[in-house]
């Protein structure tokens, strides 16, 4: 979320809604894992500052990764797919690693809001304090950009795995590989909104340029992988 750009307005709005007051800290990142699905959705729908768009994108990407894992697990051990079992086991191992990375991304996005709050509350009465605060804001903005960027990178990995699994996975569950592809592409592009909204506030022009180049590559590659995967899945549904 655009913590620097919209914080004054958003803070006032959330305080008026009794969701977050100036004396309170945002939720602990670990707290999210104590919720059931209903609690997660209710918290996301509330005026609370977290979980926000980056965390939601990571969650959607993790769901895509879980679908790859599920279809791989439904393929391994089946006599009909013995010839591809080793390949599918490798896909499963990588999908489990990517799922874990996206879960870490979800909590990291929540942690970044807490980090921002600490910097935002730094004193700014003197020129020295203002300079120090501005310097630390640049650090936290860059970190707040890297977290959703890494979420997008991991979503691309989900798409790669879905593309590999599509032609060889258990045909009776192959539609879920298509689900994984759609979820991962959407999650990737959603996560990049959290990058896009923070990037203009970062003063390092070289960094901004590099991120924009990667954004273009991620979008192009994700669309290609999704289209290829969905085509294969659709053909195998017949």
Image (cartoon, rainbow, N blue to C red):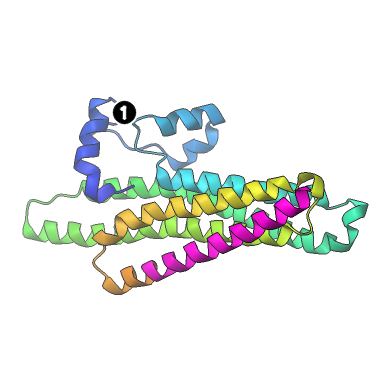
**Horizontal arrangement in the rendering, residue 202 relative to residue 123 (left or right):** right
Q: Residue at x 38, y 52 (%)?
A: 193
Query: Residue 227: within the magenta?
Result: yes
Q: Is residue 70 above or below residue 229?
A: above
Query: Residue 33: within the magenta?
Result: no
Q: Which residues are magenta?
A: 212-238
97 or 238, nearer to the observer: 238
Q: Is residue 141 above or below residue 206?
A: above
Residue with the mark numbered 1: 19
Q: Position of residue 12 (x, y in %)?
A: 20, 33
Taking the view exactly as shown, the residue that stands out farthest to the left is 126
219 or 53, nearer to the observer: 219
Q: Residue at x 26, y 61 (%)?
A: 200
**Horizontal arrangement in the rendering, residue 236 relative to residue 227 (left or right):** right
Q: Residue at x 75, y 48 (%)?
A: 174
Asked whether residue 165 appears in the rendered view, the answer is yes
Q: Position of residue 135 (x, y in %)?
A: 21, 62
Q: Position of residue 71 (x, y in %)?
A: 75, 48
Q: Position of residue 225 (x, y in %)?
A: 60, 62
Q: Secondary structure at mark 1?
A: loop
Asked whether residue 21 appears in the rendered view, the answer is no
């Amino acid at each position: 979320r655009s913590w620097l750009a919209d914080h004054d307005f958003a803070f006032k709005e959330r305080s008026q809604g009794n969701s977050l007051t100036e004396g309170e800290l945002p939720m602990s990142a670990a707290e999210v894992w104590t919720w059931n699905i209903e609690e997660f959705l209710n918290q996301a729908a509330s005026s609370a500052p977290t979980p926000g768009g980056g965390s939601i994108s990571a969650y959607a990407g993790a769901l895509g990764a879980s679908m790859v894992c599920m279809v791989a697990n439904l393929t391994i051990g089946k006599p009909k797919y013995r010839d591809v079992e080793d390949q599918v086991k490798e896909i499963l191992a990588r999908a489990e690693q990517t799922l874990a990375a996206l879960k870490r991304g979800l909590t990291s996005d929540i942690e970044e809001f807490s980090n921002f709050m600490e910097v935002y509350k730094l004193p700014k009465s003197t020129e020295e304090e203002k300079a120090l605060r501005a310097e630390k804001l640049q650090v936290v903005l860059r970190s707040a950009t890297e977290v959703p960027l890494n979420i997008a990178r991991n979503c691309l990995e989900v798409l790669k795995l879905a593309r590999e699994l599509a032609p060889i996975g258990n045909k009776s569950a192959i539609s879920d590989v298509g689900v994984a592809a759609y979820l991962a592409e959407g999650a990737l592009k959603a996560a990049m909104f959290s990058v896009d909204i923070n990037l203009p506030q970062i003063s390092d022009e070289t960094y901004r340029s590099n991120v924009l180049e990667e954004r273009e590559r991620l979008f192009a590659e994700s669309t290609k992988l999704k289209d290829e995967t969905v085509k294969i899945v659709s053909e195998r549904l017949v």
